[in-house]
Image: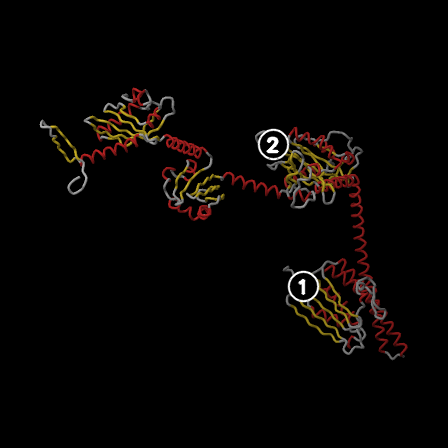
Amino acid sequence: MKKNGSPFYGEVSAKKLNDGNILGIVRDVTARKKLELAAWDNLQKFRKAFNSRTIGMAIFDEKLRFVDVNPYFLEKLGYSLQEVKGKTFEELGPIIIDEKLKRKEALKGLNEHGKVLSMELIVRPNGKEKIHFSTSAESYVVDNKNYILATYLDRTEEKKAQEKIISSEKKYRELTERISDAFVAFDKNWDFTYVNNKASKIIGRDSIGLVGKNLWEEFPQFAQTEAYDTFKSALENQKYVQFEQFHKPYDVWIENHIYPSPEGLTIYFRDITKKKVAEQENRKLLTVVENSPGFIGLSRMDSNSIYLNQYGRKLVGLPPEGSISDISWFDFFPENTVELIKDEYLPIVLKEGTWSGEAYLKNFETNTYVPTAFSAFTINDKVSKEPIGIGSVAFDLTERKKVEKEILDLQSKMNAAIRIGKIGYWDWHIESGIIDWSERMYEIYDVEHGREINVAFTKTLVHPEDLEMHDKTIEHKTKNRDDSSFTYRIVDRNENIKHVLVQMEVKVDLDGNPINYQGTAIDITQEKEAEVLLERQNQELKKTNSELDSFVYSASHELRAPLASLLGLVNIMKKEKRSDDSLLNLRMMENSITRLDEFIGDIVQYSRNKHIEVVPEKINFSALISRSLEDFWYLENTQKIKVIKNIEEGDPFFSDNKRVMVLLNNFISNAIKYHDMEKTSPSIWINIKTNQKEAIIRIEDNGTGIAKENQDKIYNMFYRTTSKVTGSGIGLFIVKEILDRLKGTVSLESTLNKGSVFTIKLPNLSPGD
């Protein structure tokens, strides 16, 4: 204890002196003692650390021989302290992999820096698995001796984990490179973390160059597509998304599979352009199939139906929608043919792969059967080539069957017509020179049946006087493709002359050269003879008509002259002073003579209309009407009837003057004769309009009118509506004949006791037209 009471460490030295006293010397060694205590404490701590079970420690001398090794490291090495002490690692055997290299690396660090901060060692202990150590070392000096303290941290498990990770990453990379899909990964900031080769090819960018770069910055146009919202949504909602996208600039379809995680997105995508094109083609094909005008069906090998297009459904009376899986392939056929199909036709389909023929299909709605051109074929697996289904195609033959029946009926009728009409048929093959004749041809030309017919022989049958005409006609028809008929004479075996009517047509090749003649021939000898007879009779009839016309003309003049004399005498006698009875008799005589004169005049007009040609000349309607009214001065009450004329001649009108005069005379005389004197003002209205096309003549009266039931009869010869009025009954008959000759028309509007309106339309026969 010091004077101040503080303790200290003292070192005492004592010596016994000769005088028996003890000499003692005390030195203050507190500082040294504290150092020794600290060193002891450190030593204890070092010993505790040295004997740790978590880290290996070893002390080496300057020649790298073991001086001391803690138990943990000895356990790892599989040796005892006695076995390693004083030895180097080399003397223990090849337990360090690349020992020389590692030794050189360690000595270099110790010599240059006095320590080794970190070095990896792989140790293969005696009989144990190799151990990965992370080692560090530092040199120090004790008692002027150099030592090296080394620590060894076991990193084996960590290395194994790293190797597993590396292996896993390697396998992962290999997998992502091997898969057919393109693969990219992004972190949550949309930076690329991985791009496999397939993706690099599709994107058109180097995969290494993309890693670490932002998706939206590298591909700004991509942010304008639907992918932007889809990617964002998948990351935000952490939900798997699959979608297809068309990239117009590259003309490709991409299928995307997006897998989100909290760290970002993993996207597998593939080019499905070919698939899409195939789908489009399939849709087109399906559209064609659906809209095909035929039955197209598909069945499984167990005969259950899979598919039937819309036309097929309609053909067999099935609804447009709904499953047909419960309908067997055999159900489409009539029951009485199913066994035949199973036993004969289906085996052919399975063996040959196809069968075609005519078959009836059942209509399930009407329970009727439809004739079809039917084909069945197997559908085979692409790989195994084994049949997996049966396809069916059928086309409705109903209309064709109907047409075939009509053709057969027509053929039958044609054969009957040829047979009844005695028509011969011939076919001349130019190349062979042979002419095929029907049986009727042999009969017409009076040639022995079966004889070979050629061109030279047919010319011997033609009448010599017609042969040149015959050859020229055929030449003309060939050149001009004229298929009109012609006639010529032939001479039969009995030297009889016949007339034949020939109809022919020419078939030519692409260059227009004739390759075939075919046609018909009819014996028209009787018709020709009848024509000759008819012509002779016509000539005789013309002669008779001419003589009759001359007779009528002469007789009319011969008869009308005495009648005119009689009328003159009657008029003279009427002027003489007579009794009332005598005057009455004279008037009756006058009326009879007048009727007879009118009748003769009508006959003359009829005769003239029949035999005299139409001579167009300019018509003066006003003059004709005035003349007509003057001619009928003698008719009863003519002077008491008011006649109103209205003539509008827009264009000069041309027609037959005499015939127009007859028309006006008849209509005006009838209007006078059938007047109604009991009316306040008996009148006749004559309106005429002309134009470039026609003249419209309207003659109206307010006379007695014509009953409706008589209106269709007034143009008949000798028809009269009443006997109270004088007349021959042929006036309107002659009118109708004249109108037919002039190609005119007449219409009637009439009401009994009110009057009649006749409208006549005559075509303008102007020379300019």
- Left or right side of 447 for 646: left
Residue extending furthest toward the left? 19
- Camera-nearest residue between 58 and 740: 58
> Residue 17 at x, y = what percent?
10, 28
Which residue is located at x 45 percent, y 41 percent? 267
- Cα–Cα span, label 2 and label 1: 82 Å
Q: Earlier in the sequence, mark 2 or mark 1?
A: 2
Q: Comparing marks 2 and 1, which lies closer to the viewer?
A: 2
Mark 1 residue type: Glu
Looking at the rendering, which quadrant does residue 80 occupy? top left
Kind of element beneath mark 2: strand
Kind of element beneath mark 1: strand
How many numbered markers are drawn? Answer: 2
- Camera-nearest residue between 60 and 486: 60
Q: Quadrant of the C terminus?
A: bottom right
Mark 2 residue type: Asn
Disc 2 marks which residue?
380
The mark found on residue 694 in the picture is: 1
As drawn, 35 above or below 639: above
